[in-house]
């Protein structure tokens, strides 16, 4: 039994299908949320490029890691995993910011 559906099905295959359907829906939501996040970070990158600001902000990244680790703990998610995820995303964001800055430098 789980919080998703407290009534156990008589057919484990049906339960497995139901759980997988929930996972698929969550995955879709995560992709949509990541897309929205990257829309915002692209705007940040354009602003940074326009005003020749550095692509990364280590102080903010440190604050975010602290915040996300605490959120992970509250949510019963491994804080180390949350930090790895954040570092992966930030590396991609910085890469985008650097590309935007290179594009601005050529103008």
Image (cartoon, grey):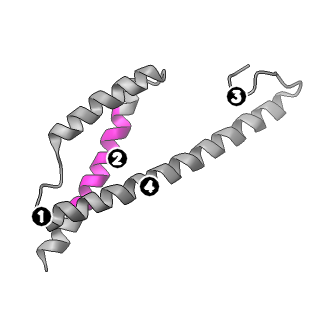
Disc marking residue 51:
1
Residue under label 4: 36
**Is there CB contact under 8 Å for labels 2 and 3?**
no
Residue drawn 24% across and 65% down?
A: 46
Residue 78: x and y in percent read 43, 24
Task: Provide the secondary structure element on which disc 1 rests.
Answer: loop
Which residue reaches farthest bottom? 107
Considering only order in the chain, which callout, 4 or 1, is on the residue closer to the N terminus?
Answer: 4
Depicted 10 relative to depicted 87: above or below: above
Q: Main secondary structure of the magenta part?
A: helix
Question: What is the C-alpha distance between the residues marked 3 and 1?
Answer: 47 Å
Q: Is residue 88 magenta?
A: yes
In the rendered image, the quadrant that contains the N terminus is top right
Q: Is residue 9 left or right of residue 73?
A: right
Question: What is the C-alpha distance between the residues marked 4 and 2?
Answer: 13 Å
Which portion, as a residue range, is magenta? 83-97
Residue under label 3: 4
Tell us which disc is closer to us: 1 or 2: 1
Considering only order in the chain, which callout, 2 or 1, is on the residue closer to the N terminus?
Answer: 1
**Is there CB contact under 8 Å for labels 1 and 4?**
no
Task: Provide the secondary structure element on which disc 2 rests.
Answer: helix
Residue drawn 16% across and 73% down?
A: 104
Residue under label 2: 89
In the rendered image, the quadrant that contains the C terminus is bottom left
Considering only order in the chain, which callout, 2 or 4, is on the residue closer to the N terminus?
Answer: 4
**Is there CB contact under 8 Å for labels 3 and 1?**
no
Question: What is the C-alpha distance between the residues marked 2 and 3?
Answer: 28 Å
Residue drawn 11% across and 73% down?
A: 105
């Amino acid at each position: 039994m789980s919080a998703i559906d407290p009534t156990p099905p008589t057919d484990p295959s049906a339960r497995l299908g139901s759980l997988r359907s929930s996972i698929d829906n969550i995955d879709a939501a995560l992709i949509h949320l990541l897309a929205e996040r990257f829309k915002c970070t692209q705007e940040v990158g354009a602003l940074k490029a326009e005003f020749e600001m550095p692509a990364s902000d280590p102080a903010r990244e440190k604050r975010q890691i602290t915040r996300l680790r605490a959120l992970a703990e509250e949510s019963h998610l491994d804080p180390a995993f949350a930090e790895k995820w954040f570092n992966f995303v930030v590396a991609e964001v910085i890469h985008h910011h650097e590309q935007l800055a290179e594009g601005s430098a050529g103008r």
